[in-house]
Amino acid sequence: MRVLMVCLGNICRSPIAEGILRHKAAAQGLDIQTDSAGTAAYHVGEAPDSRMILIANKNGIDISDLSARQFTKADYQNFDLIYAMDQSNYDNMIRLAISDEDRQKVRLILNEANPGSNAEVPDPYYGGDQGFQHVIDLLDVAVDKVIERIQVNG
Ligand code: 4NP
């Protein structure tokens, strides 16, 4: 199973979503390929935001090796499940889809924990440290549900 996490800049929310999934998959011995991307190109080639690296570490998760890239149409071929952190990321990816198969791969990640809520992972970039921890807390719960989906559906 190949899972892609997507936000705007690929330096705050989607790298920690990838880091949490990678951490849990390894702990449970699951064969899941993970990656993350941003719908924008502002931060391509950069490491995750230093605040997120630090707070991730405090939560036992290392994302310091990750590097930002932009989402492309080819990701529809390369991934089975594609998770948007917010509605704007979702809309941007749907615009690049060329088939229903593509569109069906894209989901709002918090709908895994709260189906139909269409809740968004708030962008912590312009806020304080507690915003980063809040993102981790939301994604911790949602990623457990992602793993449950993968285990049920193979
Ligand atoms: P992310 O956060 O989408 O969670 O990586 C952001 C990072 C950078 C910017 C916006 C959001 N920016 O405008 O540079």
Image (spheres, helix red, strand yellow):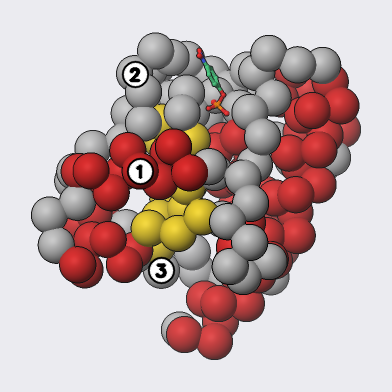
| Residue 139 in picture, x, y percent from top left | 70, 50
Nearer-N-terminus badge (3/1): 3
Instruction: From the image, tell me which residue sits under label 2.
Output: 41
Q: In which quarter of the image is the C terminus?
A: bottom left
Work out whether 32 lies above or below 123. below
| Residue 46 in picture, x, y percent from top left | 47, 15
Mark sitting on residue 146: none
Q: In which quarter of the image is the N terminus?
A: bottom left
Q: What residue type is labelled 2?
A: Ala
Left or right, residue 7 beside residue 61? left
At 60% from the left and 34% from the top, the residue drawn is: 13
Q: Quadrant of residue 65?
A: top right
Q: In which quarter of the image is residue 51?
A: top right
Instruction: From the image, tell me which residue sits under label 3.
Output: 1
Left or right, residue 32 beside residue 98? right
At 53% from the left and 42% from the top, the residue drawn is: 86
Q: Which of 146 and 128 is in front in this view?
A: 128
At 81% from the left and 38% from the top, the residue drawn is: 134
- Determine if residue 102 is in view: yes
| Residue 5 in picture, x, y percent from top left | 48, 46
Mark sitting on residue 91: 1
